[in-house]
Image (spheres, helix red, strand yellow):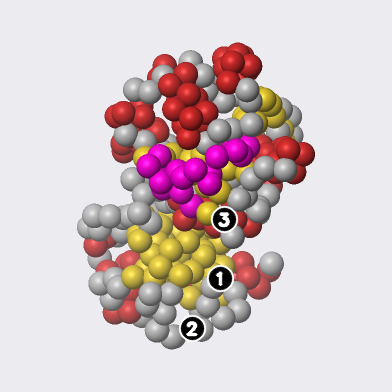
Amino acid sequence: MTELICNIHNIKAKHKNCVVTIGNFDGLHQGHQSVIQSLIKLGKQLNLPTCVILFEPHPQEFFYAEKAPARLMRLGEKIKLLQFLAIDRVLCLRFNKRLAECTAEEFVKKILVDKLGIKGLIIGDDFRFGRGRQGDFVFLQKLGQEYGFKVFSTPTVLFENERIGSSRVRNSVKQGDFKLAALLLGRPFRLSGRVIYGDQRGRLLGFPTANIGLHRKVIPLQGVFVVKVYGLTTPLLGVANCGKRPTIKGLKNLLEVHLFDFDQNIYGRFIEVEFLKKIRDEKKFDSLETLKQQITQDVAVAKNYFVRN
């Protein structure tokens, strides 16, 4: 079971002596997984627990708010996958003004050395951290010699001669290229969350939906999609709308899923929505009747997709 340590003040003496990697790990794609596997290998070599240091909110969300890149994963999804990858500990640091102003050397001394007593540090070859992003591999090696820990850089992971990175995954998801996204991630692209109460408008239109709050400043994709839903009984087929629902002047981003041949109460249930194909962009309709006609067409397209695939 992966132990979650929330913030610096919860680091205890028992957490000293470990091997560490640091990053945002948004999406936990194949490149990230390579770093994680290197960390696990180092932990076994030194017979020490592994610790992944994350930041919440994502530093770019702190600096740029709504202009930040869309988040591929929420913190809970990240921790769940790190647990699956057999990481011992996750240290989640609140990214605030104080941490933003912390120099790379202060971060290493106060957190990595004094608090965690690290013996090894694994980083991606493009990793930078600290105020002014001055903490890179060469800088960390110098501090490692001073404070007694080893620093290892992992090479960039390529797919089709191009670097695998969160922005590449983000672009493939945004463009509806879910096959490429799955190859970069090493698994299908999914969004997950609890089913919440909506305004029951889908039911009135004849297409009841399971609504999921996305809890993100910026969403990674927008439109209408063919989907498969996990977490209920067997995987269920459906069609989903992701966005602000302009026809009814929606104010917040929502993921609405209409499941085929399914009519059970699933409020409060945690589900995962896998995206298979984009049908169309989200758009504003002149009336609820034209919206209903369009949804009827969307459902037909989705059902036809499952017949052919």
Q: How many marks?
A: 3
* Residues in magenta, as a range: 4-21
Q: Nearer the viewer, residue 156 or 264?
A: 156
207 up-or-down from 226: above or below? below
The residue that label 2 is drawn on is 262
Q: CA distance from mark 3 to mark 1?
A: 23 Å
Q: Earlier in the sequence, mark 3 or mark 1?
A: 3
- Mark whose residue sits in front, 1 or 2: 1
Does dot 3 land on a helix, a strand or a loop? loop
Residue at position x 53%, y 46% in the image:
14
Residue tagged by mark 3? Answer: 2
Locate the N terminus by quadrant: bottom right
Asked if one can make out residue 30 in the rendered structure from this viewpoint, the answer is: no
Q: Nearer the viewer, mark 3 or mark 1?
A: 3
Mark-to-mark CA distance, 1 and 2: 13 Å
Q: Is residue 192 above or below residue 231?
A: above
| Position above or below: 138 against 279 | above
Identified at 55% across, 40% down, the residue is 16
Tell me: 282 left or right of 129. left
Amino acid on which disc 3 is placed: Thr
Q: Position of residue 303 (x, y in %)?
A: 57, 72
